[in-house]
Image (tube, rainbow, N blue to C red):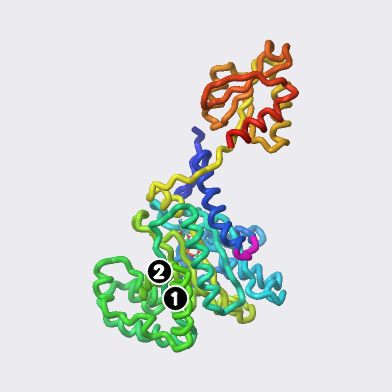
Amino acid sequence: MSTFKAPKGTYDLLPPDSARFLAVREAIATPLRNAGYGYIETPGFESVELFARGVGESTDIVSKEMYSFTTKGGDQLALRPESTASVLRAVLEANLHKSGNLPVKVWYSGSQYRYERPQKGRYRHFSQVGAEAIGAEDPALDAELIILADQAYRSLGLTGHRILLNSLGDRTCRPVYRAALQEFLRGLDLDEETRRRIELNPLRVLDDKRDEVRKQLVGAPLMPDHLCEACKAYHEQVRELLTAAGVRFEDDPKLVRGLDYYTRTTFEFVHDGLGSQSAVGGGGRYDGLSEMLGGPALPSVGWALGVDRTVLALEAEGVRLELPATTSVYAVPLGDEARGVLFAAVTALREAGVATDFAFGGRGLKGAMKSANRSGARLALIAGERDLAEGKAQLKDLESGEQTEVPVAEIVPEIQRRLAAQG
Ligand code: HAM
């Protein structure tokens, strides 16, 4: 062990477990690519101001959890706590929204950083795959994104996820609701900090998990009862499209999200096997964000799914992903001459597309065969001086133990034939 450890709230992804993370990212990305989303990558850090304006100054994410720093050049930057603001900044900067092809549909995958109190499922460095559809107001787009996330979870074999759906209204009806909620909350018996929250961000109070607060929230005015006609009709269409697609969801009139940019449709994917950090993903519409960043009106919708928590959800359900074996052939040379011959064979096999590994370090037969078995390879390619004198090598089936000879010149086609025959 070295003197150093991974920083608090972080962990390393190591093989073989890391293969599951790659498979989860891929499973989330596949339905997105299939639906016309193009890949976007933005920097891991941005101006602090972008997040303050985009995510909201009063949110926990911005006020408490941001890794912000001043560069040697005097710039105020922050490691990204989320990617929606960055993606919209990038789209506006590159004028993608002027391409005449709206919505701009993009997906991303990467690290996010939040200085949170670490616990199972809550880390300071975590990974999301996200999707954003920018520049269209269409209930079908909201429905598309929810359906694609559901497809991704189901393709992984998850069955225990639930979809919570709500509408947070728009700039017409939300202020009226906000005022009604504030009036109700001001009449409750709450601590100092929560009272402050009523003035800054009253919707967040609905999300309070403490029993003594929850009890008092019974009877609180709820957003769905205050939606204007346009928001109500929009939300009803999203619900109908999801129902028609056979996607089950639960209306959750108290669902609020930890970011300020949301309008209208909001949703969360939760998994009950995860304890308190049950949200495996979340998202919604953010029709006003572009203007908040100095851009034109670009109604948009998106989500981000947490890769770490999706892996935990798979574990909770006991789902074992079918991961392709990484190595098909493991070469074991015995002696210097064999080393040269088999190393050349390994290179030729890899060029032919056969996943092959090699016993490095001049190890003896026993140790090398142990590694061959551990590698998950189907065949071991073994050669010693005596084999080579006859122009041959040995091919051992690691499952049946059966061993056959193969002429050195035939190694690649013979292995290809054997692997193809095994399917
Ligand atoms: P979010 O709800 O803050 O939304 O994060 C999305 C997901 O990231 C969560 O549901 C969770 O799975 C994962 N996540 C968040 N924080 C942590 C953490 N500390 N440790 C592990 N996993 C975590 C957003 O980030 C929005 N940008 C989503 C969005 C995209 N809305 C519109 N477009």
Name the one closer to the observer, 366 or 415.
Answer: 415
Side of 168 where 136 appears, left or right? right
Q: Which residues are magenta?
A: 35-39
Please check the rendered image and state whether residue 277 is part of the magenta-colored stretch, yes or no: no
**Where, quadrant-wise, is the C terminus in this rendering?**
top right
- In this rendering, does residue 361 appear at all? no
Side of 352 where 398 appears, left or right? left
Give percent across and percent down for residue 346.
69, 29
Disc 2: which residue: 249
Instruction: Name the kind of residue labelled 2 in the image.
Output: Phe
Are the residues at dot 1 and dot 2 in contact (C-beta closer than 8 Å)? yes
- In this rendering, does residue 304 appear at all? yes
Name the one closer to the observer, 111 or 102.
Answer: 102
| Badge 1 residue CB within 8 Å of ligand 1 | no
Disc 1: which residue: 239
Give percent across and percent down for residue 279.
41, 61
Measuring 67% from the left and 61% from the top, which residue is drawn there? 73
For the residue labelled by badge 1, is the local secondary structure a helix, a strand or a loop?
helix
Residue 281 against residue 334 in the figure, above or below: below
Residue 344 against residue 315 in the figure, above or below: above
Name the one closer to the observer, 227 or 62.
Answer: 227
Residue 388 against residue 78 in the figure, above or below: above
For marks 1 and 2 on the same chain, the one whose residue lies earlier in the sequence: 1
Q: Residue furthest right?
A: 409
Q: Kindly report the secondary structure that dominates the magenta region of the rendered protein.
A: loop
